[in-house]
Image: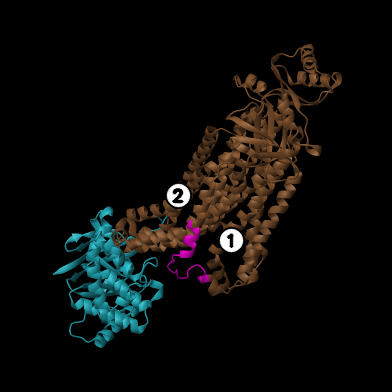
Chain colours: A cyan, B brown
Amino acid sequence: MEILNVNNLKKVYSTRFQGNTVTALSNVSFSVEDGEYVAIMGESGSGKSTLLNILASLDKPTSGEVLLDGNNITKIKEKDISKFRRDNLGFVFQDFNLLDTFNLKDNIFLPLVLANTKYEIMESRLNKIAKQFEIHALLNKYPYEVSGGEKQRVAVCRALITNPRIILADEPTGALDSRSSDNLLNIFNDINKTGQTILMVTHSTKAAASASRVLFIKDGEVYHQIYKGAMSNSEMYEKINDTLVSMAKGSDYHE
Amino acid sequence: MNKFFYLKLAFLNIKTNRKIFLPYIISSIFVITMFYDINSLTTSPIIDNSFGATQLLLMLTLGSIVVGIFSVILIIYVNNFISKKRYKEFGLYNILGLNKKHIAIILFFETLIVAVISITSGICLGILFSKIVELFLSNILIMNPIKGFHISFDTIKNCTILFSIIYFYTFLTSIRKIHLSNPIELLQMNNYGEKEPKVKKLKLIIGIVTLFAGYSIANLIDDPVSAFVMFFVAVILVIIATYLLFEAGTIFVLKIMRKNKKFYYDKNNFTTISGMLYRMKQNASGLASICILSTCMLVAISTTFALYLGVDQTINNFYPHDLVITVYDDYGKDDFVDEIYNIALDNEIDIQYFNEFTYFENLVNVTNNHFTGENENNPNNCSIMAYTIDEYNEQMQTNYSLNDNEVLLYSSNKKEMDNITLGDKQYVVKENIKDAYNQSQVTKYLGFDGYIFVVSDELQLDNVAALTIGNYSNPILKQVYFDTTSSTQLLRNIIDDINMNIEINSYTTLKYDAQQSFYSMFGAMFFVGIFVGALFLLATVLIIYYKQVQEGYDDAQRFIIMQKVGMSKSEVKKTINKQVIMVFFLPIIVAIIHICFAYKMIFLILTILNVASNQLFMFCLLITIVVFLVIYLIVYYVTSKIYYDIVSFK
């Protein structure tokens, strides 16, 4: 079953004085199956971030549509957007985006509190998730007291605690050392195995190689995609690298 | 790189940082304008034309010193804030290849630009407004306005020198900070991790105790004299309490709120409580300062306002008659009162009221109810007055009669006694009276209790007078009162006639002269009160503005994250509003609470100065608070808009 459909997405930014226009996305279409783990790769300026912002309903496309479970999220009214985001999407960011005024427990609770969840329910969900991620000991600490890897684990907990339809991850390994990166990618694989849909934007070949499918974006269009299928991580790694090299050379590899 | 490059860079810096420079320059101009205006008044012709020239000059000089000192503090405070805000910028310059000397040159030009703009516009505006301020002052002092326009070159010189030194000092402190640090430190100075604030139990307890002590002192004291003495003790206690409780008390309360899970994990409280916890940690002392400044301002303006509005009443209390001739030696003349009356008639004075009054007054010692002659400066000194029951009955329209050993007793302190001992003679107090004729005469000595004894006859009056002997003795005095509609000049004429034609030792008190001197005294106080009050207000506004801007930058990142994890724009706005309102109005609410508790004490002190009307003081206080709140609300509106713009990256 398809959970996410992106059809003919176009985003044009115009500068303040209406002189120049910049096309960030020219025509992007793809879909994501329920339970899939998709990575999106592309160089800086290829439109990855714009795409993710639109999927996250933080930005509106110039034209085209994004269907989540068949509902067009670009048509959601401004006042309902944050509720929609809270209920359906979980976010993991490169720089964690934890609030330093809250301890880690309250950071994880934040989306639930905003959704007016009862304290008992929040507590039981947290217990389950904290066990899974082994962060029990950290809960009363503050973001500046723990390591980057631990922060990112907490951020993943925060994304998962609302039971979102899809997790959107923006360069989640970007600020982590290699051990913490591996750790995080394992976590992503684990939660993906339980049926959680993940869409990840990344620069890292290694991170992308852990996904079940990789989409390549160039100049605002989907340029190519690779299914992992039965490939091992290292075979996938090779294949992604080949694609990146040919993209850089500008050949028509995908045809 | 030539010098123009630095000048250009300095200009550019000020332009790009206008959110912090503009209020700095505007408030500097304001401060300099105020300083110019109050300082130029000290050399203005208004002084020579005024009645109490020395008093007025003293008040204005004091006022201009206060304004000067306050300007120094204010400019240095704001400059510290600005240079803190710009560490990152300087770190970047450092990395881009400008060494510390170059940065110092840029800073120098920046300071120079700010100084030149502020000092020249400040002085120009000062000159422009000086006439208005002068007219305002002459109006307050009920004088005729001075003709002509007066520019004080001394003041221009004073302003230029004083503020150049201040700006040079701010330049030195800024470069000192730059010199002491390396670029990485400069870059990171603004974003170190914030520890969660702890409840400081000791501070909390001391704060509660001092607040309680201060409030108790203010409300348990009943007599004006001790109120005057203890006022400063109470003020200091409350200031200490304010600082401690803003620091420890607010965090204590917020933590209690956070402990209540149901309350804390509520959409409406969650972000506000945690945000406030951090805000209070950084801003406790700033908010406490705002609170104290606004309390001082409200008290300063409302009391001087009440004194000024009450001046007529005060004069009527002290000087109930238009002309009083006090005779302390009549050389055995029996008919001098008639002679005075005839002189008045000869001068065609329109006499509305004429009377004579015989009494005794002096300072003596009192222990419990035993009065003895004054022999040294002694804390039990009090002011006494005595006259016969006949005088009393006539003036108060009563029908008392007294035996030789009986008195009526009036006490300014509302003390009641059953009997009193004067020297070695005992008297029974027939009645403790609430009002006595000429009672204001015994309260005119600041800091002394006053008593009036109404005795049976002149023999007993002599006995009271015998209480004090030698150097301390006073004769029994006779006063002659006139009330008239005739001109002051005519009154002056008969004073001359009396002095020339009647052989008595006397002095005269003209109500008109007293009025002039009171108006010049209280008017000057009111004027300086308004000036200093305006300055306090400016300081309050500035501190709060910079706090909001500072927090806006700190909070911006936080609110972006909240939006990303599912907070809507309107929710963010609601949270922001809640926090801004708390930060804004907490100090003012506390200031008003302070004033409520201090009301009784301030009023007691005002009664020493004979502003006895409760309604008048209440009225002045309410007007001051309302005006202050209106200005404060405008500031709130403007700052919260700027704050919102910063956090939403507009």
Callout 2: helix, strand or loop?
helix
- Answer with left or right where residue B586 lies relative to residue A62: right
Q: Nearer the viewer, mark 2 or mark 1?
A: 2
* Marks 2 & 1, CB-CB < 8 Å contact: no
Name the residue beneath numbered marker 1. Answer: B80
Q: Residue B275, image x and y in percent? A: 40, 60
Side of B20 relative to B517 (left or right): left
- Taking depth in this image into account, of B59 and B579 the one nearest to the observer is B59
Residue drawn at x 66%, y 36% as measured from the top left: B421
Who's the residue at 37% across and 79% down the image? A176
Which of the numbered marks, if any, corresponds to residue B585? 2
* Residue at image point 55% right, 54% down: B237
Would residue A211 be seen by someone viewing this image from the given angle?
Answer: no
Q: Is residue B198 magenta?
A: yes
Q: Chain of mark 1?
A: B
* Residue B393 location (% of width, % of height): 63, 20
Q: Marks 2 and 1, Cα distance to the nearest angstrom?
A: 25 Å
Q: Residues within 10 Å of mark 2 (few under 14, many from 20)?
A: some
Question: Mark 2: which amino acid?
Answer: Phe
Part of the protein shown in magenta = B187-208
